């Protein structure tokens, strides 16, 4: 074999030998200690997950890649661990104590209990940690336990924990309620999704009109001593303005009528017109859906008409 073929052949052989190891699947089942009675589970850093026990409140750390199970926090008589959540950046694991009325904070580096928060509760079930506070559901009493997190990242004082009554549409029934809680995104995640998905409309429109501009104009400006940056700002952008505005209008119309990403990322405080329309059609609010559609049409047609009239006034082309 020639030297030129030796190196590629060796690389191909190494790839073939390592591919099965790289493609090895995660274990489909991870056995836990006998009588463990697992309940809550949460992801930590890397491939680490934490699983709590209803039997004695013990917590184990699980490597979901290798399937290994290691003790994290020892249990105790009368202790219960229901829901769990990992606090990113603080090396803390929060555990809901079920009927004990306790919320415990663990140090994920040592497994030690940093603080115990005792509250009046029925059954503390699930927990979620946000940037501002720790929220714990109560499955028997219509309340949410809130533990505010200090801005400096320190551990909250036990006296700061309080119960937030749950009212409105959420009505408790006999048995377990509020079995689950999740922190939803704010308006920034919606903006990011719109920019990533819809900005190419503007870029495509701008590049299309750029190809219609004679390159000799730019070359002449630079040959006359104008810097490339000044040429782009003072010459090219005004010539491209029609395409830029046209792309912005197209992006606006696409964003205003966007639903697929919004319905996944929106929160109750940030409902767009398309989400309101979708929810109304899923229920019995045909009138609300019709009103929402009318507003959506108005919000899309009026800007388009305004931009079209403005471009005609200055004799600009959209393409």
Image: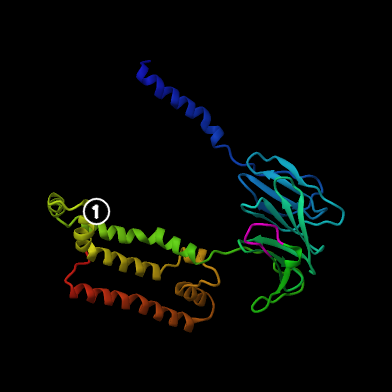
In x, y percent, where is residue 16? 49, 29
**Seen from this angle, which residue lies furthest right?**
77
Q: Write down the quadrant of residue 116 in the picture.
A: bottom right
Residue at left offset 14%, top offset 54% = 221
279 relative position to 32: left or right: left
Residue found at x 22% / y 61% = 240
Where's the N terminus, which quadrant? top left
Callout 1 environment at 10 Å: few (<14), some (14 to 19), or many (20+)?
Answer: few
Tell me what residue is drawn at x 23 percent, y 61 percent: 237
- Residue 153 among magenta residues: yes
Please state the horizontal and vertical placement of residue 138, each as a whole percent of the image.
74, 68
Tell me the quarter of the image containing the C terminus.
Answer: bottom left
Magenta extent: 148-156
Measured as percent of width and height from the top left, residue 257 is found at 40, 70
Residue that protrudes farthest toward the bottom in the picture: 287
Q: Is residue 298 above or below residue 256?
A: below
Q: Horizontal and vertical percent for residue 74?
A: 80, 47
Could you tell me what secondary structure mostly forms the magenta stretch? loop
Q: Secondary structure at mark 1?
A: helix
Query: What is the basis of the colouring in this image?
Result: rainbow
Kindly identify the residue that appears in the image at 73 percent across and 43 percent down.
31
Q: Magenta segment: does it hold 70? A: no
| Residue under numbered circle 1 | 229
Q: Quadrant of residue 64?
A: top right
């Amino acid at each position: 074999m020639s030297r030129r073929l030796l190196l590629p052949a060796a690389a191909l052989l190494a790839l073939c030998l390592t591919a099965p190891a790289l493609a090895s699947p995660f274990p489909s089942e991870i056995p836990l200690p006998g009588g463990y009675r697992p309940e809550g589970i949460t992801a930590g850093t890397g491939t680490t997950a934490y699983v709590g026990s209803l039997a004695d409140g013990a917590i184990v750390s699980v490597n979901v890649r290798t399937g290994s199970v290691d003790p994290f926090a020892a249990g105790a008589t009368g202790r219960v661990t229901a829901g769990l959540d990992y606090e990113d950046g603080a090396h803390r694991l929060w555990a809901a104590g079920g009927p004990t009325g306790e919320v415990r904070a663990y140090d994920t580096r040592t497994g030690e209990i940093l603080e115990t928060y005792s509250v009046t509760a029925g059954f503390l079930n699930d927990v979620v940690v946000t940037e501002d506070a720790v929220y714990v559901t109560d499955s028997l009493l219509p309340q949410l336990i809130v533990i505010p997190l200090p801005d400096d990242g320190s551990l909250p004082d036990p006296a700061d924990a309080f119960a937030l009554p749950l009212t409105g549409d959420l009505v408790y029934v006999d048995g377990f309620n509020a079995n689950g809680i999740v922190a939803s995104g704010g308006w920034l995640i919606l903006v990011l999704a719109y920019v990533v998905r819809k900005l190419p409309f503007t870029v495509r429109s701008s590049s299309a009109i750029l190809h219609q501009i004679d390159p000799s104009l730019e070359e002449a400006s630079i040959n006359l001593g104008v810097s490339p940056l000044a040429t782009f700002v003072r010459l090219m952008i005004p010539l491209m303005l029609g395409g830029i505005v046209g792309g912005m209008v197209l992006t606006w119309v696409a964003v205003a009528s966007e639903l697929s990403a919004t319905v996944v990322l929106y929160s109750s405080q940030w409902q767009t017109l398309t989400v309101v329309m979708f929810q109304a059609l899923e229920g019995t609010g045909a009138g609300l859906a019709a009103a929402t559609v009318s507003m959506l049409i108005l919000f899309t047609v009026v800007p388009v008409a305004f931009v079209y009239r403005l471009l005609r006034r200055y004799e600009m082309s959209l393409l």
